[in-house]
Image (cartoon, rainbow, N blue to C red):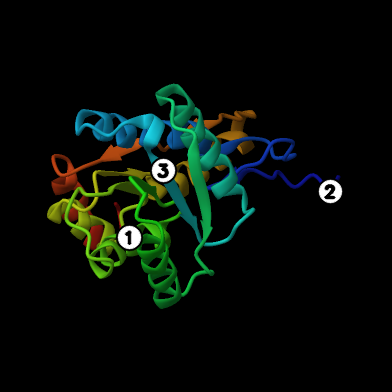
């Protein structure tokens, strides 16, 4: 109403009255990581009908987790996986997250898949799996973002893959598109995410992570 242009980055929601959005399509990203994790499990001989999926999340009900889980569950349905649970990991404190994930793995030995819905819960999965006495690949795990624990898990085989939403691009394109909007009214929606990182592509991430680019 006051003539101030508003655009969104990083997280979006249906009906959000922004001019445009720069960031990851969370549902699509969830589908991508879900499909990779489930396909890996099937190739290892896991029976989808007997499989159990846990999805830890820092803040249950938050937009990012709701949308990502929607994409993951779409992939799960395609693979015939019916048993799943969203785990309240207790917030943003890493020790709490790690404890809750460890407790879950100990209490639910039927778990075959684990997909973190946020960066912190994904980061703590490797340590939680070790704490629970799991071997690399025993539970097929993945998630989101490229935090140190996640990258270490990829190297050690505890993590199959993770999604990089490429946050540097979100900040960069926000400035560029803000200028373009002011100049000529451009209002582009740009999907920066869905970049799958695994043990074969981790090198480029490690190179630029210290520079706060990846």
Label 1 sits on a secondary structure element that is helix
Whole-percent x, y for residue 37 in the image: 31, 37
Q: 68 above or below 36? A: below
Is any atom of residue 11 visible in this view? no
Q: Say if mark 1 contacts mark 2, CB within 8 Å.
A: no
Q: Residue furthest top?
A: 78
Checking the image for residue 110, the label placed there is none
x then y, percent, for residue 133? 22, 65
| Residue displayed at 29% across by 51% down | 214
Q: Nearer the viewer, residue 7 or 126?
A: 126
Q: Nearer the viewer, residue 71 or 213?
A: 71
* Residue with the mark numbered 2: 2
Reading the image, the residue beneath label 1 is: 125
Q: Viewed as shown, does residue 44 lie left or right of 107?
A: left
Residue displayed at 41% across by 52% down: 116
Please name the residue that numbered disc 3 is placed on: 52
Alpha carbon distance from label 1 to label 2: 46 Å
| Rendering coords of residue 8 (x, y %) | 61, 45
Write the residue at 74% across / 36% down. 15
Real-space Cα separation, disc 1 to disc 3, in angstroms: 16 Å
Disc 3 on helix, strand or loop?
strand
The answer to which quarter of the image holds residue 198 is: top left
In the picture, the quarter occupied by the N terminus is: top right
Mark found first going from the N terminus, 3 or 2: 2
On screen, residue 95 above or below 14 = below
Helix, strand, or loop for circle 2?
loop
For the point 40% across and 57% down, the residue is: 108
Residue lying furthest right in this view? 1
Q: What's the CA distance linking mark 3 and mark 2?
A: 51 Å
- In the figure, is residue 194 to the left or right of 175? left
């Amino acid at each position: 109403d006051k003539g101030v242009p508003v655009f969104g980055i990083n997280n979006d929601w249906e009906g959000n009255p922004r001019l445009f959005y720069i960031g990851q399509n969370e549902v699509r990203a969830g589908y991508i990581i879900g499909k990779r994790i489930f396909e890996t499990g099937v190739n290892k001989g896991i029976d989808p009908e007997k499989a159990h999926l846990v999805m830890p999340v820092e803040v249950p009900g938050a937009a990012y987790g709701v949308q990502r889980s929607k994409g993951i569950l779409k992939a799960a349905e395609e693979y015939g996986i019916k048993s799943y649970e969203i785990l309240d990991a207790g917030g943003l404190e890493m020790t709490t997250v790690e404890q809750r994930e460890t407790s879950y793995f100990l209490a639910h030995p039927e778990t075959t898949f684990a997909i973190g819905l946020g960066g912190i819960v994904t980061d703590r999965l490797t340590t939680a799996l070790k704490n629970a006495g799991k071997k690399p690949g025993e539970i097929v795990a993945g998630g989101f973002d490229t935090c140190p624990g996640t990258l270490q898990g990829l190297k050690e085989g505890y993590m199959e893959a993770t999604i990089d939403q490429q946050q540097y691009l979100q900040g960069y394109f926000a400035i560029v598109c803000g200028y373009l909007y002011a100049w000529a009214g451009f209002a582009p929606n740009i999907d920066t995410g869905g970049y799958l990182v695994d043990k074969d592509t981790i090198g480029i991430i490690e190179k630029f992570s210290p520079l706060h680019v990846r």
